[in-house]
Amino acid sequence: MKLPELKIAHVIARIPIIQGGMAVRISTSRLAGAVANEGGIGIIAATGMSVEELINEIRKARALTKGIIGINCLFAVRDFANLVKAAIQEKIDLVISGAGFSRDMFQWGKEANIPVIPIVSSVRLARLSEKLGAAAVVVEGKEAGGHLGTAESLKKILPEIRAAISIPVIAAGGIINGQDIVEALKLGANGVQMGTRFAASEESGASQEFKELYLRSGSDEVVLVKSPVGMPGRALKNAFWEKLDRGEVIELDGCNGCLKHCTGDYCIMEALERARLGDMENGLVFSGECVYKIREILPVKTIFQNLLQEIEACPG
């Protein structure tokens, strides 16, 4: 199959693959730059960063590539507006946002001529996004890692949303290999977003322990967890998950009020950061449903080469 370009407003990616914006600090400049260098769209996860750290990461990414660099920022974080506005001031190529919905971000993007792309999981939200000025939407099914907005599969909601709007549609959730990409394109997607596969890349900011848990995990190790954000999250079984599953109280080291709304059950930012650093006892490891398809930790360049070979082998 011949891959189409991905056109999002004036931004054109040679390869229709967006790398997921995985927080906290899984998706930083090194990963985003490597993906952009291969012709995809590299994404820096702004969630959990300070404004100064995000600016630094954007500038580092620009030094690594002439390709397309965007950010992903969860609407749920208290510093959402400052982070997005800082990225726009740095002339980021595009902005992706999920875990809630900001109407203001579309106006910010319009004023700066920067495409804004919400993550949606329903026809209603996709239509509203188009009406408000979204350049595209990321349609995320239940197969995705991290915070989820639906219990429906991508294969169900993708065709429904494709039929309801005219802007580009990016498929997300459960996409690991070339065959998955081809299937998404045949369902009407203009491109795909891949997080889990790139979390298990050499350039990912995740620790070796984090990546090795990906390689060890089968489909029965993928679970849903309750997040303080107020949404379910898809993660992997580990010692921290066992504590949550048993209903143990997770002590907080302190609270800096990073979320607009928080249940206070535990600190999601702290749990994600500990996992990134390799603390499997006290860290939460987000992952998509299809992590079991990943057999090796590879450089981004090799991942792209493998994907393109797999796509080429699929019938058009």
Image: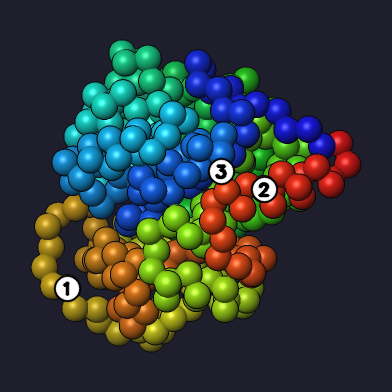
Q: Is residue 78 visible?
A: no
Instruction: Determine the residue positioned at 39% across, 63% down.
Output: 206
Mark 1 and mark 2 residues within 8 Å of each other at the beta carbon? no
Element on which disc 2 rests: helix
- Work out how far the residue at label 1 is from the one at label 2, CA to CA, in angstroms: 43 Å
Judge whether 67 appears above or below 246 on screen.
above
Mark 1 is surrounded, within 10 Å at the Cα level, by few (under 14), some (14 to 19) or many (20 or more) other residues, namely: few
Q: Is residue 309 visible?
A: yes
Mark 2 is surrounded, within 10 Å at the Cα level, by few (under 14), some (14 to 19) or many (20 or more) other residues, namely: few
- Work out how far the residue at label 3 is from the one at label 1, CA to CA, in angstroms: 33 Å
The residue that mark 2 highlights is 305
* Colour convention of the picture: rainbow
- The x and y percentages for residue 168 are 60, 26
Amino acid at the residue labelled 3: Gln
The residue that mark 1 highlights is 252
Instruction: Determine the residue positioned at 62% across, 34% down.
Output: 15
User: Which callout, 3 or 1, points to the residue nearer the camera?
Assistant: 3
- The x and y percentages for residue 37 are 51, 37
The residue that mark 3 highlights is 193
- The x and y percentages for residue 14 are 61, 28
- Identify the mark nearer the N-term, 1 or 2: 1
Which quadrant: the C terminus? top right
